[in-house]
Amino acid sequence: MPAREVHDSMTRPIAAPLEQCAEVHGVDLDAIQEAAAHVEPYLRIDGTKVWSLMQLERQLRPDAYGRVRGGYIARRRPRTTGAVSG
């Protein structure tokens, strides 16, 4: 097995063209284009536009990233029921 296949999870790009982003996220091109409408692309030196995979994932799956006011990640704390003993 080639080394690239063994370490494939470590070679995932940070940003890529939309077609490659759709492939990495496992969605069709229409869905990724809709998500990309809300994400500013990076511009490579050769003029190629690439989109952040993390930013697109947050657009595609917003429920996976709980947020609170100020942009911090929410910590889900279990609700306590009953009286607090001291």
Image (tube, grey):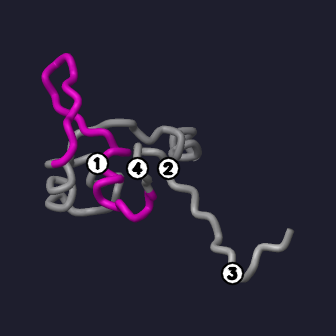
Q: Which residue is nearer to you in this view: 52 or 46? A: 52
Ranked by sequence position, the earlier of labels 4 and 1 is 1
| Pointers 3 and 1 in contact (C-beta within 8 Å) | no
Which corner quadrant of the image does residue 43 belong to? Answer: top left
Asked if residue 3 lies in the magenta stretch, the reply is: no
Look at 68% across and 75% down and name the residue there: 80
- In this view, 74 is above or below 78: above
Q: Residues within 10 Å of mark 3 (few under 14, many from 20)?
A: few
**Disc on res. 69:** 4
Q: Which residue is mark 2?
A: 73
Q: CA distance from mark 2 to mark 3?
A: 24 Å
Magenta segment:
38-66
Disc marking residue 81: 3
Q: Which amino acid, mark 2?
A: Ile
Q: Secondary structure at mark 2?
A: loop
Pointer 2 local density, CA inside 10 Å: few below 14, some 14–19, many at least 20: few
Please provide percent x and percent y for residue 86. 86, 68
The numbered mark, 2 or 1, whose residue comes first in the sequence reads: 1
On the image, numbered disc 1 is attached to which residue?
Answer: 21
Q: Give me the disc on residue 41.
A: none
